[in-house]
Image (cartoon, coloured by chain):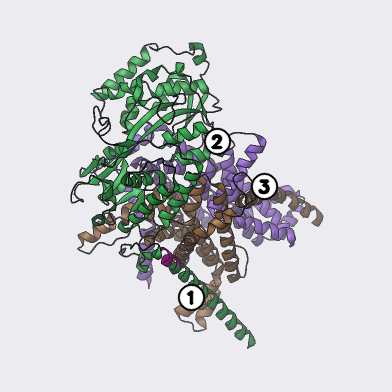
Amino acid sequence: MKTLSRIYTALVFMFLYAPIAVLLLYSFNSSTSTIVFNGFSLQWYKTLFADGSTLHALYNTLLLAVCSSVIATVLGTAASVGIEKLRKGALRSAITATTNIPMMNPEIVTGVSMMLLFVFIGRILRINAVLGFGTMLIAHITFNLPYVILTVLPKLRQTDKNLAEAAMDLGCKPGSAFFKVVLPAISPGIITGLIMAFTLSLDDFIISYFTSGPGFQTLPIVIFSMTKKRVKPDMYALSAIIFVSILILLILYNIAQVKSEEKSRKRH
Amino acid sequence: MKRLFSVFFALITMLLPLSVAFAASDSEIEALRGTTLYVYNWGEYISDGADGAIDVNAEFTKKYGIKVVYDTYDNNEVMYSKLKSGGVSYDVVIPSDYMIERMISEDMLEKIDFDNIPNFSYIPEKYRNLDYDPTGEYSVPYTVSYVGLIYNSKMVEEAPESWTALWDERYTNNILMFNNPRDAFAIAQSILGQDYNMDTEEGWRVAAALLKEQKSVNPVYVNDEVFLKMESGEAALAPYYVGDYYLMKENNDDLAFVYPKEGVNYFVDAACILKGAKNKLAAELYLNFLNEPDIALANAEYICYGSPNSAVYDNPDYEYYEDELLYPEEGAFKTQLFTNLPPKILALESTLWDDVKNYNATGSSYRSLFFGENTSASIDNGEAFTSETIKYGICIGVFLLAVIAFVVFRAVQKRRREKY
Amino acid sequence: MNRRSSLNSKLTVSPYIIWAALFIIAPLFFVVYYSFTTSAGDFTLENVQALSKYLPTFLRSIWFGIEATLICLIIAFPTAYIIAQKTDKIQRTMVMLVMLPMWMSFLIRTYSWMAILQDTGIINTFLTKLGIHPVHMINTGGAVILGMVYNFLPYMILPIYSVMAKLDYSMVEACQDLGGNRLTVIRKCIIPLSLPGIVSGVTMVFVPSVSTFYISQKLGGGSFDLIGDVIERQFQQSYNYNLGAALSLVLMILILISMAFMNKFSDEGEIVI
């Protein structure tokens, strides 16, 4: 049974990582092809760093992901605290239902509907270039919010409601009671929400595609616009770099966590 | 050697004061320092500094101190939709011929002050005032090229000469086709001897019928995947742009190219300035800059399409100097330009294309749902099309029934349990 | 005390309410508005009538979505179960490994699947070397479904795992003690207990599968138009916002109906992550 489960896990991970292996391989290709391997070379990594526009797109992608996930986390955490305290009723169920909409709604519908809204607002306010960083940020925050709320809410439910009250009885103002007592208790949920939002924002193509504007193209949009010409291995090289750096970050994070766990164990 | 030459050339142009005079004074140009220019171009359509070539946008910024915000799109229609929605504003765009005509007719383009584009003198008469811009006030040609038939000489029995090779049943499953309506229809229209720009609905329907007929060879509709599939020998025949053929050939020597005898589409992508451009003078500087001999050369070699700039195609150091595919003799084969279609025809083209795409999708064998050989489709007036629909309908119905049965079963079980 | 805290809650939730009204609810009205108007802004039912032509596309999208979701479920459930059995440290690492591919653009990942699945691709080269007859995979419906399964599998594994990780194992043990064999334990105990995770996993896979538009173009060879492809074409290429909006509206209603149906399964109406 044990070996069976091992083999099974290995197969699943092989499936998940097969295209990434291919991508790593072809990023070292010496020709312009992403299908015919002509020999080993580092030229695409060189090209990548010589080409400012790709790096700029990467910068845009990261900027958007960081901004949208942070804002969504703050807004979403505040909202969950509010929702948790709301009495059961029409307002509460309306809010929960609304929260589910961006998650349930197909991305393409969200993207399209947001574009229609922005264009309409642009026409009313007579801004002739409404699409851009701002609209993409709004769109990303909007689809990130539900994920944050739905990771924070359960954590809030798990925390003891008397905690905050106790803190307030001990002389804390409601604000500081929240920051000193409740926030630490729900922080795992917040962090999960933040990571989730960041990941979704980073990976999003469809919504960005409909809401992007001049001067702010994210990486997926740049890749998609190569549809008439071709995707060259420099894009693979970029993906490879992203992959390896995240892998290293994760390993470091894991090591750090193991160490801190050991420390706390020793303390006890 | 060539690289040396271009570096040398770049040096000279930088050292010498501008040899040709602008209408705009130096102080006006100087005043643009620190401003921003918004450029919207096709993806992978400008020399970007890879492999030691010139990074055109960076050079422009270096020369004039004007920042270039450079965005890319994947086809004319996407660009048009983005601009038309009113959500975006750019200064310079580089659409294709028919789209330029459409944009002129919808008053989306600004007249260019050619006094500010002295390098326009490099553009010969034959590329000026073409049908899409008859007065020549709105556009500066950027690339000129042709569509043709790329084939893998190892996979075809004899070298094709006609577009009908794309309908040849011997190459079933090995045929690629354009995944955009205009180019796909143009091929059918060539075979039928029709005008690409005809405005009779009946003609378009006939062309659509021919495209539907092609389904019997199971064509794969592609954009950029054509590179992958031709380079790896996955497909035998593909219509695509001649410049891209050279890029593919670098990776697969078996590939060959032919201009089919029925005639091909000849296209011009040209730089234009958008109405309401905030930085018009900078846009004109940019258009002029694109036609600097060294810049135009770098772009021509990067993009691999024909250049309308005589300083490029008359330059013996140019990689494709006197290349007979990129610069074929005039009248060697029939060519047609696209022009803007009236809205009614455009709408028809769009629905007909949807019909073609959905017609009898990849045979009608159920096995094609899973991995399996695709039985080649039979053409029986859309019979299979409905049978495919019925098949999916039945599948979904059965699934829903199963789910409902399960739910009912559980509910009954639960009630029974509660009884005890 | 109570008054103060309820005031506070209104205060913290109100920015979200405003945000939701502006950017979640309002855009939906535009979809409805565009669906029933002509490009000049007059009321029309033409867009809705034109939809009947797209019935085959809708059916195909739904069926592919169902298949992809079921396959994801079959793959993800044991995976999540296996991960949940490991020690905390290994669990963390494995979850991260499941999420990691999502950090690279799905366009690029889908693109590289082409190199794997082609007739001259990696799998078939391998098969030929082994002397096995190559299998035609690319440009079939199966390849499209595979692309969907690949891209959305993590969305199935993660929610199921997070429910399983929190499972009360005393319940499972109780079940075993009552004489259940392995299969009964899974069927009677683990599946019902992890139902909320399954429900949200199914939602998170089914919805994007039905509406995706890049995968079918690349892996299906352009012959398996899904509804997402059609919507994208209407908006970005044909500049027909009205028909596009009508298609989006139908897609949205369809999804909402199936989700309402799904939620009947789980006792909790909310989704867990």
Our reading of the magenta stretch's main secondary structure is helix
Kindly identify the residue that appears in the image at 30 percent across and 57 percent down.
B217
Looking at the rendered structure, the kind of residue marked 3 is Leu
The residue pinned by badge 3 equals: C22
Chain C as rendered: colour: brown
User: Of the residues tagged 3 and 2, which is closer to the observer?
Assistant: 2
Q: Is residue A131 above or below residue C152?
A: above
Number of residues whose C-alpha sits closer than 10 Å to that of mark 1, classed few (under 14), some (14–19) or many (20 or more): some
The quadrant where residue B48 appears: top left
Q: Which chain is green?
A: B
CA gap between label 2 and label 1 equals 55 Å
The residue pinned by badge 1 equals: C186
Quarter of the figure that contains the N terminus of chain C: bottom right
Horizontal and vertical percent position of residue C238: 49, 45
Number of residues whose C-alpha sits closer than 10 Å to that of mark 3, classed few (under 14), some (14–19) or many (20 or more): few
Name the subunit of mark 2: B
Pick the front one: B145 or B333: B333
Quarter of the figure that contains the C terminus of chain C: bottom right
Pick the front one: A129 or C160: A129
**Residue B88: which numbered mark, if any?**
2
Chain A as rendered: colour: purple
Is residue B347 visible to us here?
Answer: yes
Q: Are marks 2 and 1 in contact (CB under 8 Å)?
A: no
Name the subunit of mark 3: C
Looking at the rendered structure, the kind of residue marked 1 is Ile
The quadrant where residue B377 appears: bottom left
Looking at the rendered structure, the kind of residue marked 2 is Val
